[in-house]
Image (tube, rainbow, N blue to C red):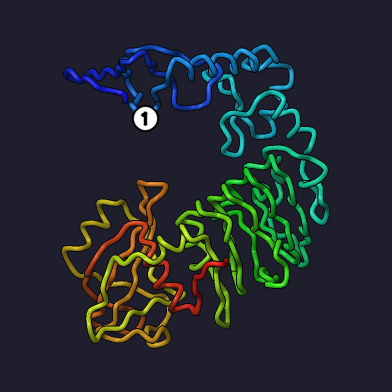
Amino acid sequence: MINTNTIGSITELYVGGGNFITENYPTLYPTFSVRKVLTNGDSEGNYREVTASEKATIESNVAKLIGAGNGVRTGMTPYFEASGAVFKDKTGYYYFNGIKDLTEEDMRQIFVAGVPTIGSHQASSVYRVRTFLPVNNITGQIPFPGDIDCFCYGNRNLEVFNYFRNYIIVAGCLRRSFTDNPKLREIGNENEYINASKYILYDPSAPKETFSELPMLEHVYIYKLRSDIQFRDSPLLDYDSVLYMVNNAANTSPITIYVHADVMAKLNTSDFVIPEGKRLVASRYAVQRNRTKAQWQALLSGEEDFWTGVPVEALGIKEGDIVLVGGKCTDSTSEFATIYFQVTEVDGNKITGKHLSLFFNSWEVIRRMASVKNITFATLT
């Protein structure tokens, strides 16, 4: 365990028992000490404790990488950086697509692979890289059908698929496009996503359907979901991804999102009890606001007016109903606030009400919103 000793504005970390303090992030220039004084901008989270045996292993691995020509700028560095990578002199690694420990050889492979061609299997059998160069300087969408059938199937090295820079795939075929990628953590983001409005994503007759065998998957952004989908092998699927799917779903009939048992356990939590005799309303026009965390917390002390953008009658909202009011915390990259808001007055496009309870990143809220949209969650055996 790392111990701390603070005197005035100075904090020192120290360990005993023959252990060492070293960096808690990828670096080809690790340091090892039993005491470490934190400087400005540094924090305890940047360090971890290792044993003497672990120290020897780290030093051996780093020596091999340095011996292979890593850790310094080369003649290829300008080309890699022109493609969006950043060489970090402090760590000796390239940073690209959110991966922070790319070696010279990793970057060479990514550079040679180039941009995979839509409608091919280039991202799977042809190149087995940790990430790909994104489509650059292109705006718009791949017109339907955008066939990415088996696009990344079986790529066992792929970690981040951020192909969509300024590019949105309207998927005509997604069959097995992301299957058997044991290291894949991220597929797109909330602004560069897969538009699923044209494709039936889940077929019970196909056991190796899209998004199978992805044990490390955390982030995936699916827009206009209209059919069943499954992430049964992904226990790390995060709050943002599930919320995004529900918020942007375009189903016109009931659908099911199949999730891992660990995700299901989060969805089955209970944060808030709807008062007896009251009705929860959560429509696809749910009120959205973006505020700081402190501003969200301050809302609990009073009433507020919200403009819904459409006539309140069209939303089926009545006095006494409880509405989910939510939005991002502008001072946080990972928190979404939701308030249970009880309507006290309805007037045209405006609702007035009082705030009952506030939650941050509430999985129960996702489940409640999904239920109103005819979306259910289930597990698959």
| Residue 294 screen position, x and y as percent | 25, 51
Question: What residue appears at the point 64 percent right and 54 percent down from the top-left corner?
Answer: 213
Q: Nearer the viewer, residue 162 or 159?
A: 159
For the N terminus, the quadrant is: top left
Q: Quadrant of residue 369?
A: bottom left
Expressed as whole percent of the image width and height from the top left, the position of residue 158 reads 67, 42
Q: Residues within 10 Å of mark 1 (few under 14, many from 20)?
A: few
Residue at 45% from the left image edge and 13% from the top image edge? 31
Residue that appears at 24% across and 69% down: 304
Q: Tally the numbered discs.
A: 1
Residue occupied by mark 1: 45
Q: Is residue 237 left or right of residue 177?
A: left
Indicate left or right for 88 with 149 as reference. Answer: left
Residue shown at 69% from the left, 14% from the top: 69
> Which quadrant does the C terminus fall into?
bottom right
| Horizontal and vertical percent position of residue 253 | 57, 83
Q: Nearer the viewer, residue 19 or 145?
A: 19
Q: Residue 181, how many percent across, how many down?
A: 67, 48
Q: Is residue 364 left or right of residue 242?
A: left
Amino acid type, label 1: Gly
Give the structural element (helix, strand or loop) at label 1: helix
Kindly tell me whether residue 67 is visible in this rendering. yes
Residue 136 visible in image: no
